[in-house]
Amino acid sequence: MNTFPRPSRSPRTTGGKRTRTAVAAATTLAALATLTVASTSSAAAQSPTQSSDQGAGQPVAVQYAANILPLGDADLTETRTSTALAEGVTLTRIVRGTEPAPADQINTTPRGPWVVNVLTIDPRKARGELKATYGADLAKVEKTTDLVRTVGALAGVNASFFTFTASALYPGDPVGLGIFDGKLLSEPLTDPAEANFIIDAKSNKAVMGHLTWSGSVKNPKTGTTLPLEFVNHPPVIPAACATLPAQTACAEPGDVTLFTPEFAATTPAGAGIEVVLDRDGCVERVAATRGTSLTKSQTSLQATGSDSNALLGMVSHTCLKTDLAVANEYGTNLKLKKDLYAVTGRYRLTANGKIVVPAGTGSFFDRNPRTIVGTATDGKLTLATIDGRQTTSVGTTMDETAAVAKSLGLHDAINLDGGGSTAMAVNGALVSRPSGTNGAERAVGDALVYVEK
């Protein structure tokens, strides 16, 4: 699947797209000690028909029976098995098609099969909360099953795109917006493909869109202000200054980055300036090179290029004020408060009940495993995974993914990270089948999890 470079001086690639070989144990719904009700629907009577305005050789319009997934031929058998996981929380497994796909036809066959797992949360009945988690620290990767287990969640799916193989040191670094319990730990991109899912865990109310941000550090005494380039992402050394022993000798602009203790055990090491601040923003120490550990009450500012001198000029015997702001598509600031979470996807699937996914070509738009998050008009939340790249479930194109989201009643929906990252876990065990070798589960950057209170 395609990557999405960070549109700045520091390109961040997207994660979750290459197969790994670690073997993960899969479980079935039969392992769940819950009541299961199965239903089967066949659309055999609804065979494809050619509309009157289509000439010979033109695509035919497939008519589907009600309440089935609009995937493949209309005569495919579809089975749905629903399991009540908790009050207001239901898991439905949909299997469409019965015959394994030929290995060389996975990306083209109209016969499927498709395996879709759908977790539905009704905030009016459910007693828990939907939120995001990233594990031990932001820069690490962990399997979705482990993320679900660690926080004691009932269920969860993989979420944001992440740096993955582009960074051996910080593979879990989100590529785009990351808000965790009201803290902005990763800034949104300017890439219009980015789509953000924002959830208030206290009320389980969610919104979607493409957020923007602004960040700066200011010396209140002098009024000097520096813009922030990143939050918790390594600053870039200008190419022309890569061999200089000190970045203060560089005439090219670099980056100024804010690091929080959630990022990693230590901040990124290298040439440049690092300023450590206490909880009040007062300068605790200044280093001529980058890389240090932070306590829970500290943050740091790193600078490269000529920005190193600018930062040094601000910090003498004073306290600094760091400002971070996130705004919606209408320019209204989003209050960064406790219980607020946000993750990042690529492309809206539906908006206000309409399919809005753009046309596209290439591997990202081809059939792949997919992870979806969305909301219905009645406020219900849905997390869904579509197994893919397997003869037992071929996956979906972006168009097919949007059609599935709309068929599931999602008024608004986003395509989260997919491919080898796609995974759904219930009680810490897989219910989906990842596309890795022998169903191997990939470690990911973060997850959306439902935690019972």
Image (spheres, helix red, strand yellow):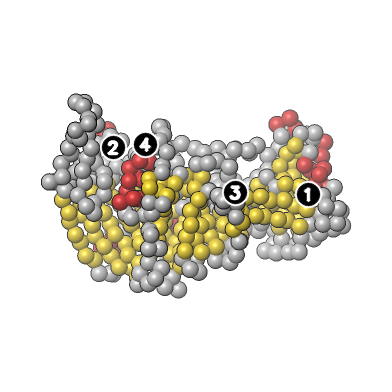
Name the residue at 22% across, 40% down: 62
Tell me the SS state at disc 2.
loop
In the rendering, which numbered label is found on residue 422?
none
- Residue 80's image quarter? bottom left
Query: Local crowd at mark 2 within 10 Å, few (<14), some, or many (≥20)?
Result: many
Q: Nearer the viewer, residue 102 or 379?
A: 379
Q: What kind of residue is marked 2?
A: Ile
Q: Which mark sits nearer the N-terminus, 3 or 4?
A: 3
How far apart marks 4 and 2 lie (CA) works out to 10 Å
Tag 1 residue: 225
Tell me the CA gap for discs 3 and 1.
20 Å
Q: For mark 2, what is the residue? A: 106
Label 1 residue SS: strand
Report the amino acid beneath label 3. Answer: Thr
Is the C-beta separation of discs 2 and 3 under 8 Å?
Answer: no
Distance between mark 4 and mark 1 Cα atoms: 46 Å
Where residue 370 sits: x, y (%)?
38, 47
Q: Of callouts 3 and 1, which one flags the residue occurring earlier in the amino acid sequence? A: 3
Distance in Å between CA atoms under marks 3 and 4: 29 Å
Residue assigned mark 4: 366
Mark 2–mark 1 Cα distance, whole angstroms, equals 54 Å
Q: Residue at x 24, y 41 (%)?
A: 72
| Marks 2 and 3, the one that precedes in the sequence | 2
Q: Position of residue 274 (x, y in %)?
A: 76, 49
How many other residues sit within 10 Å of disc 4, few (<14), some (14-19) or many (≥20)?
some
Secondary structure state at the residue bearing disc 3:
strand
In this rendering, which labeled residue sits more in front, label 4 or label 1?
Answer: 1
Which quadrant of the rendered structure holds the C terminus?
A: bottom left
